[in-house]
Image: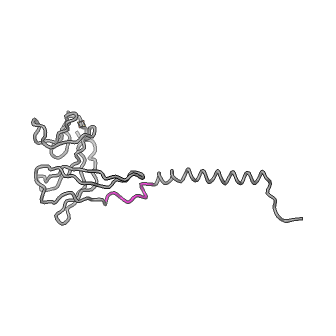
Amino acid sequence: MSDKKQVSRRQFLNYSLTGVGGFMAAGMLAPMVRFAIDPVLKPSAAGKFKAVAEESELTNEPKRFTWKINQKDGWYESEVEKSAWVYKNENGEIVALSPICTHLGCTVDWGSNEEYPNEFYCPCHGGRYKKNGVNIPNTPPTAPLPLYEHKVEEGMLYLGQAKSRGSGV
Ligand code: FES
């Protein structure tokens, strides 16, 4: 009599289906796990500063500066233009504001409305912000303009991420 174990047709079918099922389940789960932990795998965005202007260009009057960043969205890579309103306040501190209105995302302009010459004005729904980016009560925006992280190195101004300042007035 032979010592070899015999595998019945039914057992073989069970093993095969279990193997194929496991393989398919792993194939479906792997992208989900990758998606769930993706932020952990990405390098921190905190260190991404871009040179946008020479510090000597900054005055007490907000000026708009633009720069480009490479953006990766899944497999799609593109170059995106960013911009900021930048000035030095009365203490000589640099203030870099996002130009994106916190109401519905239009672009705000400095001093473009004759009635409010020293304010940021949003033409879409009449949103207004003080020079420091704080929203003016009884206008559509309900939060201040986000502030960019910034640093100055060897006379160059570098901007990082725009950070929300929470709800305003
Ligand atoms: S989008 Fe700026 S006021 Fe509405």
Membership of 105 in magenta stretch: no
> 61 or 168: which is nearer to us?
61
Query: Is residue 39 a member of the stretch shown in magenta?
Result: yes
Q: Residue at horizontal 31%, vertical 53%? A: 79
User: Looking at the image, is 138 positioned above or below residue 51?
Assistant: above
Give left or right: position of 89 versus 83: left
Q: Nearer the viewer, residue 117 or 67?
A: 67
Residue ID at (19%, 45%): 133
Tell me where residue 108 appears, x and y as whole percent: 20, 42
What's the magenta region?
Answer: 38-46
Q: Is residue 151 left or right of residue 114?
A: right
Please tell me whether residue 1 is drawn above or below residue 63 in the rendered image.
below
> Dividing the image into four equal quarters, which quarter contains ligand 1?
top left
**Is residue 167 shown left or right of residue 55?**
right
Left or right: 31, with 143 as reference point: right
Q: Position of residue 9 (x, y in %)?
A: 79, 52
The rendered magenta stretch, by its main secondary structure, is classed as helix
Image quadrant where residue 113 sits: top left
